[in-house]
Image (tube, rainbow, N blue to C red):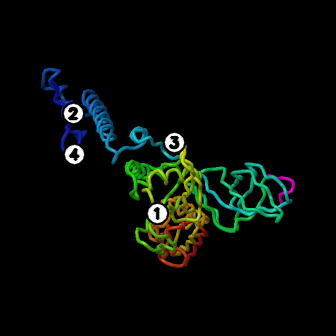
Amino acid sequence: MTSVPMPVFGDAGFSSPTELENLAGVLADFNDAFGGNLNLDLSTPQGQLATSFAAVISAFNDLFVDFTNQVDPAFASGRMQDALGQIYYMSRIGATPTTVTATITGKTGLVLPVGSLAKATDGTVYQTRSEVTIPLSGSVDAQFAALVTGPIACPSGTLTSIYRTVVGWDSVYNSAPGVPGRTEESRSDFEKRRGLSVAANASGILPAIRGAVMAVPGVGDAYVTENNTGSSVTTGGQTLVAHSIYVCVLGGADQDVAKAIWSRKSGGCDYSGSTTISYYDEESGAPPYTVKFQRPTSLPIDFAVTLGTGPGIPGDVAQRIEAAIAALFPDYARIGQDVFASSFTCAINALGPWVRVREITVNDAASQTVGIGQIPTLGTVTVDIT
């Protein structure tokens, strides 16, 4: 029999005794073991030993309570969250690199191999994602991805240098900003996607379509809406034909995206979107289905941050603020999701006591409306100290 209290399972789950309660129990056990009248002062050897025992018991109780909480998707994290995801055939999305479309010029007929390297003005090196052949016009757009993962900003006009020479390749230039990469999928994002995956088991409803599309490998974001009227409507800057669904999706192979949409839409429903794919249902052997969806266009978001003067402002203040915004930006870089300047205030304030934010604007306003066919991309970050 012990005087050390046990964890209790109640309506809110397991709760463990405090360390002081554990210490009192251990001291009582020691006193009983030695026949009573034991000096229980914590400065004595037995007091020190009891303190250590109580600390070990409390640490184990905390671990036990944390483990039991991990079976709840609302609290699960790390390996336990990954295990819950496996029930839904989900794996955590790894970190992704920043991608950017750049125009390359050079000798007609030149085949630029996969992995050809270019460098941005900030020193980040990018590589081509596929083999590119320069046509008669002497220029062609190519997709580049950063060699390192994470939310690295690539504003327009910054990918300008050839990093490794290829004979016949003359120049590279991005006229539009890149789409920032992401860090490894966070606990909250994973749980949100798990919730969406449950809807993917349904059919016909919008959450089911979005859940299926979000499960496609390589997909970073998706926006799904519909027009259930008998005539075309315009919403969020996009025209939706009568009785159609509209899916705007970032990333993923075209065929995989088309299959996901087709597998969950209702029969007879039309599509809206500028990307047209012929999807073959191998099981039925039917003629190809025409599936339409939208690829998002980039909407550059320029930040202007005004700080108050004061002591302790570091010399690289602009770089620190840009890094803070870039790290948080992917959380708000969603298709059709408006970007609010106030969302980034806390991240900037967390840089240090020297921060005195007077104003933050995005594209010269407090917020930027994002169309349902657009995805925000990080543009320039300017810092003014007054």
Between discs 4 and 1, the one toward the N terminus:
4
Q: CA distance from mark 4 to mark 1?
A: 42 Å
Quadrant of res 88: top left
Residue 41: mark in rendering: 2
Residue, disc 4: 12
> Given the image, on which type of amino acid does mark 4 rest?
Ala
**Circle 1 residues within 10 Å: few <14, some 14–19, many ≥20:** many
Q: Looking at the picture, does residue 136 appear above or below residue 182?
A: below
Residue 382: mark in rendering: none
> Given the image, on which type of amino acid does mark 1 rest?
Ile
Image quadrant holding the N terminus, namely top left
Between discs 3 and 1, the one toward the N terminus:
1
> Given the image, on which type of amino acid does mark 3 rest?
Glu
Q: Looking at the picture, does residue 109 appear above or below residue 238?
A: above
Q: Looking at the picture, does residue 156 appear above or below residue 204?
A: below
**Circle 4 residues within 10 Å: few <14, some 14–19, many ≥20:** few
Give the percent coordinates (x, y) of residue 252: 57, 52
> Given the image, on which type of amino acid does mark 2 rest?
Asp
Name the element at disc 2: loop
Q: Is residue 29 left or right of residue 213?
A: left
* Labelled pair 4, 1 in contact (Cβ < 8 Å): no
Residue 283: mark in rendering: 3
Between discs 2 and 3, the one toward the N terminus:
2
Depth check, mark 2 against mark 4: the one in front is: 4
Give the percent coordinates (x, y) of residue 257: 54, 53
